[in-house]
Every structure is written in C-alpha cells, then in structure tokens.
Amino acid sequence: MIEQSPTVDLSGRVALVTGASRGIGAAVAKAYAAAGAHVILTARTTGALEEVDDAIRAAGGSATIMPLNLLDLDKVDVMGPALAEKFGRLDIFVGNAAMLGSLTPLGHVDAKEWQRVMDLNVNANFRLLRTLDPLLRASDAGRVIMVSSSAAQSARAYWGAYATSKAALEAMTKVYAAEVATTPLKVNIVDPGATRTAMRAKAFPGEDPSHPKDPAETVPLFLVLASPACSSHGQVHKVPLKAQAA
C-alpha cells in the first residue's frame, strides 16, 4: 500500500475519466476537479454527465462532458486526436467504465454478451490506450489508472465473462507499464473492492446496500496515483475496506 498524501495538487492537469456519470467514476472526477484538474467526463448518458458537471462547477471546479458509448470502438479511436485538438494535452487517464454481464455458467453465456463484456472492459481500454498514448507520453507526469476487480484473481464460479475481462485488463495494463517504464508515465491498477455501485447491486442483489464502502472512500488512492509526485508503477493497489487514504 502506498503512503497517505495529505494533499494532492492537480492544478493545470487535464484528466479523462470514463464511466464518470455515477459511482466510482463520478466520485473520482469530482475529487480531481476539487484538486485543480480540468476533468473530461465520459459515459453514455448525457443527463447523468451533466449532473456531475453541475456538481463540479458548483464546487468551483471545471469539467467538459464528452458523451460516448465505448462499445462504438471506431469512435473511441478518434478520442486522442479530438483531445489534442481541444485541450492540447492529457495528463491523467482513468479507465473506469465496465460491464458485469450475466453471472451464469460458462456453457450458458450468450456469445454476443460475452463479446460486449470483452469489448467494453478490455478492447475499449486497449483502443483508448492506443489513441491516448502520444498525449500521455508527452505529459511531464502522465498517469494511467485502470480499474480492475478481485474477480481477476479469484476465478469465481459463474463470473466467467467479467473475471476473464478483468484478468485480461490487468495483463494488458502491466504490459503497457513495462513498455513505458523508461518514460515519466506511471501506470497502475486499482482494485476498489466491495463498493456501493449499481454494478455491485446487480451482482449481489440480496446484500445490505449499506455494507459496501461508499465510492468516495476510493478517492484518496486515485488522488495519490494521479499525483505528479507518484512513483508507483505497474502495481495493483487495493482500496482498504474502511475509509482511509492509501
């Protein structure tokens, strides 16, 4: 676990957060904006993004909404050039958007649903890394943070599509980290653990919703990993069970 940082200053940084309309993505986006970053909010739902944008602006921060369905992979490919033209830079990329899929035996998984889970959880992040790579390398302190899950390592029965996709995401992210090891770019993975999100509610419908941690409790780790002072690279970091900074 990396040490707690009392304050993280992201002034002048530009951050892209996918899945920013709710849950962990929204909490992280608000925290980055509060720390001084200009945050690009990406998700499918314009209305929900506008609510996050409104909250950021009401708190004195700045953000831009970019509605995008990450399953439209051809549109993902143009994200890098679009950001370069509009902002001229990108310092932080948080790959948070994900899909659970059905929890069912592998033999019962619908092939089209399997492909959608792989496309969102793995292929969209590959396409994002590819298109954002020039901007991230050009930053004086580029930061990539991919959101994974304990399912990537636990191989739970019935979690085939999701677990496989997160294991692939972790492998891909570690490969990218190795490839940029001699640059200022730092690449890490966050396993948020049990968190009060819509995905968690779908996976565990009978669970007491007050039991998992609030998404805001994941924020300190994301702040530290986004900081220009962060030295961690190629690591998987777990959010503590209780609220505390990483």
Image (cartoon, helix red, strand yellow):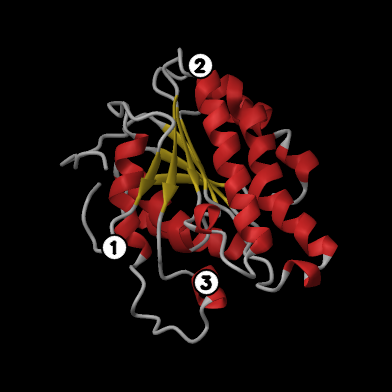
Q: Position of residue 12 (x, y in %)?
A: 36, 29
Query: Looking at the picture, does residue 200 appear above or below residue 143?
Result: below
Task: Using the image as rendered, state which of residue 49 and residue 77 is in the foreground.
Answer: 77
Position above or below: 145 against 213? above
In the displayed structure, 144 sits above or below 153; it is: above
Which residue sits at x=67%, y=62%?
160
Amino acid found under the numbered disc labelled 2: Ala
Q: Which residue is mark 2?
A: 138
CB within 8 Å, label 2 to label 3: no
Q: Is residue 127 visible?
A: yes
Residue 205 lies, with reference to residue 111, above or below; the image says below
Q: Is residue 69 visible?
A: no
Check if mark 2's residue and mark 1's residue have beta carbons within 8 Å. no
Instruction: Please tell me whether mark 1 or mark 3 is closer to you in this view.
Output: 1
> Residue most toward the right?
111
Residue located at (27% from left, 43% from top): 1
Circle number at residue 201: none
Q: Secondary structure at mark 3?
A: helix
Q: Label 2's element? A: helix
* Amino acid on which the number 3 mark rests in the picture: Ala
Q: Tell me the residue at 58%/53% (across/down).
A: 97
User: Badge 3 is on which residue?
Assistant: 198
